[in-house]
Image (cartoon, rainbow, N blue to C red):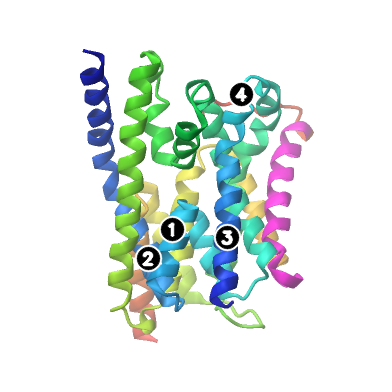
Amino acid sequence: MQFSAYRAEFWQGVRDLLPLVSGVLPFGLIAGANGVALGMSPETIMGMTVLFFAGSAQLAAYQLIQENAPFVIILVTAVVVNLRFAIYSATFAPLLAPMKRIKRWPLAYMLSDQVYGLCSVPAQQQRSDGERLWYLIGVATSMWLSWVLSVVAGIALGASIPSEWSLEFTIPLAFLAMLVSTITRPILLFVAVVSGLSAVLFQMLPYNSGFIVAVAAGVSAGLLLPRLLGRPVKPQEGR
Amino acid sequence: MDTVTLWLLFFAVGLGTFLVRVSFIELHGATRELLDRSKDILMLLPPAILAALCIPAILFTRPATEYQLDIAQVMAALVCILIAKFSRSVFWPVVGGMICLWLLRWLQ
């Protein structure tokens, strides 16, 4: 029975996601609570959460909304933060591209770090397309649900947190913790240092455009340095 | 920002993010070369983005027009880095950093 086999794959995906919820929940709590701290209504926060379905971009947007940055800058910043999804899109293109739009687009919308982490491992790649697909659907839908519910919990929690607790400082701290786990090679540390210093240097630029300039400086420096040293950047699998 | 503008912004970001997510899936078949060319940039983006987002917000007190160094925030960030070295989750580094921040603010 093919159908029951696919159903088993779906639930396997759900089960494999469950341990990751311990990482999703606090992040969702931070996202929900900071929205409340910014004075946004629960409906607005949930609308944002569902439309973005991207935690880092949501926190980045909060930070800029708080600083009264202009519309275009917030838009560009949030989308640049989400550019990593292009890698996930490419990774799953062979699996998702042949599907009908009505299934393909919702699945594309649900691509996330967790889906990439669980569904792109070699053990999954060796299986049949049907099995992979249903496993991905299991991971993606349960991830979506746990993210949305975590933000709801964060909104409930945020209402009771006094402003003296400087809750908004959890945003840069969360980015910093992610930054530390991102830096796995010296070149990436170099990029982070150049970008961080540029961000400090350019923060006086009008309209909060310093962020974009700093990211461009960091990435350019990372592309140029290996060339100056005469060593090309080693191609790396995955991200 | 008023509520209508916020919603417009969220729809715009949602659309932009969806276009990124759907990009290579829709272009399937004609993208190997494009991906290979942009791979270096995509690999360098995460550290660049994360550093540019957090470093200024950690070093200086906000909101302010003149940027003043905030020692308590810097100490909290150091605690956060230290814990992040050992814990793979985002949760404990943030909790450790916040506790450090509260302690220093309370002592001041």
Amino acid residing under circle 1: Thr
Instruction: Check disc 1 and report its element: helix, strand or loop.
Output: helix
Position of B69 with respect to A197 (left or right) is left
Amino acid residing under circle 4: His
Amino acid residing under circle 3: Leu
Are the residues flagged by discs 1 and 3 in contact, CB closer than 8 Å? no
> Dot 1 falls on which chain?
A
Q: Distance between the residues labelled 1 and 3?
A: 20 Å
Rendered-image quadrant of the C terminus of chain B: bottom left
| Of marks 2 and 3, the one in the foreground | 2
Position of A222 with respect to B90 (left or right) is right
The label number, if any, that marks residue B28 in the structure image: 4
Question: At x 64% / y 19%, what residue is drawn?
Answer: B29
Q: How crowded is mark 3: few (under 14 residues within 10 Å), some or many (20 or more)?
A: many
Q: How far apart are marks 2 and 1 (CA)?
A: 9 Å
The label number, if any, that marks residue A32 in the structure image: 2
